[in-house]
Amino acid sequence: MVSKKKDNYVAYVSTYTMGDSHGIRVYNVDMENGRFKEKDKVEISNSSYISISHNRKYLYSITDFGVEAYRIQADGSLELINFAPINGMRGCYLSTDYTDSYLFVAGYHDGKLTVLKLEEDGSIGKITDEIFHKGLGSVAERNFRPHINCARMTHDNKYLLVADQGMDHVNVYRFDVKRGTVKLVDVIRSELESAPRHIKISMDGQYIYIVHEWKCYIDVYRYEERNGNPWFEKIQTVSTIADSDNLVNNAASALSFSDDYKYLVSSNAGDNTVVLFDVNMENGMLNKNFCLPVSGDYPKDAELFPGGKFLVSLNHETNNMTFFKVDTKNHTIIMNGPEIKINQPNCIVFYRLGN
């Protein structure tokens, strides 16, 4: 009898660097026990967000004053390819188009969207387009001017969705893949002072999920193209917190899908919880499975392990990662071993070796 080959994974965790120059940590993933063991660390400043190309060959990271490209080695270690400036303040999010020909960088501090060319060897080339969002939101705390926090392509590679926390909307840009330029064609508007933060898209590309930081909810939209234009229909709004009336001290964080897209995960600072939703694969609707504490402060990101048996929470203010066994049938999580200390973690990506 031939034994089934086990999938091996590493996890990349990006962090802010305060006194430590290593902004990316690489961990071997123990899939059977739901734990990490540090494998390597990469010298990079303030790697606030990372993303892997769709061809699974390259990792891209935010850093001070620009972005860096890395070649993913066979064992999961990272080899620096190059650095490229973005002609603006430090970004907070980045992603590639579905041809891996362009890199999109979202700028929270200056409200700037930057598009950069990607070369065949994975290196980052010149800027092909840059747009500063303009406008005036509600004059309350930080929510009074553009703050771009996410830029993500629709699966058909036609439209770039750009979440602007300060202006409480998502700009929809038509993307010219030949020139690497964008043109505004639509706006998805959210509630005043809701702060749309991150965007995820269903496996089939038909449903758009937008999490709102300040009002702690996710909007679900049906998406299609009609007569050469994008069309969005809101089909659901669901809270990310256990008590939807308790918004004062809570803030929703990132979104992540399980590897099979059957579950959607978010987290909440304030009550410091992780929330998991069952995803109806037929109609895109969400049903809350659980919302439970993560044993840490300010979970900036939470992710299910591949296979969905375990979960890790990145707790920014307590400088740690906490681990849990997941039981979706009984709607529970159970602490799984001790915390792992890590300074100001912000984003995590699992990567299967042998891609």
Image (cartoon, grey):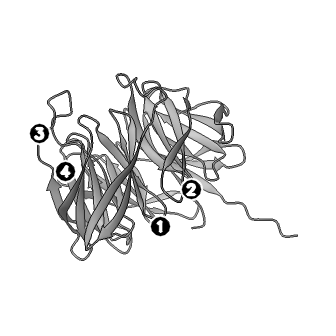
Q: Are marks 2 and 3 in contact (CB under 8 Å)?
A: no
The residue that label 2 is drawn on is 259
Q: Which mark is residue 112?
A: 4
Q: Earlier in the sequence, mark 1 or mark 2?
A: 1
Residue occupying the point 36% across, 33% down: 18
Badge nearest the viewer, 1 or 2: 2
Q: Is residue 36 left or right of residue 133?
A: right
**Residue 339, x across and y down, in percent:** 59, 31
Q: Provide residue 73's location: percent of width, then percent of height.
A: 52, 63
**Counting residues from the N terminus, which is met first, the one under dot 3 or under dot 1?**
1
Q: Amino acid at mark 3?
A: Leu
The answer to whether mark 4 and mark 3 are in CB contact below 8 A is: no
Residue type pointed to by label 2: Asp
User: On screen, 205 above or below 132?
Assistant: below
Q: Earlier in the sequence, mark 2 or mark 3?
A: 3
Q: CA distance from mark 4 to mark 3?
A: 15 Å
Give the residue number, with chain letter if any, for mark 1.
57
Whole-number angstrom distance, CA of label 4 to CA of label 2: 31 Å
Helix, strand or loop at mark 1: loop
Q: Which mark is residue 331?
A: none
**Residue 215, position in %: x, y?**
34, 33
Q: CA distance from mark 3 to mark 1?
A: 40 Å
Which residue in the structure is indicated by mark 3?
Answer: 136
In the image, what residue type sits under mark 1? Lys
